[in-house]
Image (cartoon, grey):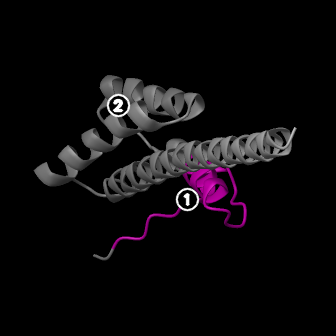
Amino acid sequence: MINMPVNIELWKLLISSIIIIGGWKAVDWFSKERDMKNKQREVILLYLIEAYRGIEDACGRDSLSVDQKTRLERAIADVQLFGLTHQIQAAKEFTERMNKSSNDDPRFLLAVLRYDLRHELNLPKSSCDPQDIIHWRLK
């Protein structure tokens, strides 16, 4: 009979240890998942910010350098790779118009990117009106 209370205490200790270890593993797994999603979000945001800059840099110029053309092409590719469905659609429409005329206004695409990026970064909302995108160029 003396062994019985010892066995109960041993079981209590064993069960508590299993719960603690299981909880620690669960917290570790959830932390890794959260960290991976945060890193993924960070990478996507960086690519889309750079895409915005590449598209904006090519706007409002009489002619584009080879570097600006390359950055514009890369920016469109990045939007197609990392963008949301409506961003991809806006990039597709812009490229289709560019293929027809070799000269098009990307302000709608820029407005979509700006609105979504500001939302993701928890900045105040911006207008989705393409006419609110201003390209200032020094002459």
| Three-letter code for the amino acid on which mark 2 is drawn | Met
- Mark 1: give few (<14), some (14-19) or many (20+) Cα within 10 Å: some
| Three-letter code for the amino acid on which mark 1 is drawn | Ile
How many callouts does the rendering have?
2
Q: Quadrant of residue 4?
A: top right
Q: Is residue 83 left or right of residue 74?
A: right
Q: Is residue 94 left or right of residue 124?
A: left
**What is the C-alpha distance between the residues marked 2 and 1?**
19 Å
Q: Position of residue 108 (x, y in %)?
A: 55, 43
Which dot marks residue 95? none
- Location of the C terminus by quadrant is bottom left
Q: For mark 2, what is the residue?
A: 98
Q: For mark 1, what is the residue?
A: 133
| Residue drawn at the location 38% of the way across and 29% of the way down | 95
| Residue drawn at the location 58% of the way across and 50% of the way down | 31
Q: Is residue 119 left or right of residue 43?
A: right
Residue 128 can be seen, yes or no:
yes
Closest to the observer, 126 or 81: 81
Q: Are marks 2 and 1 in contact (CB under 8 Å)?
A: no
Q: In the displayed image of the protein, which residue is found farthest to the left?
A: 66
| Residue drawn at the location 42% of the way across and 70% of the way down | 136
- What range is drawn magenta here? 111-137
Q: Quadrant of residue 98?
A: top left
Question: Which structural element holds mark 2?
Answer: helix
Q: Quadrant of residue 104?
A: top left
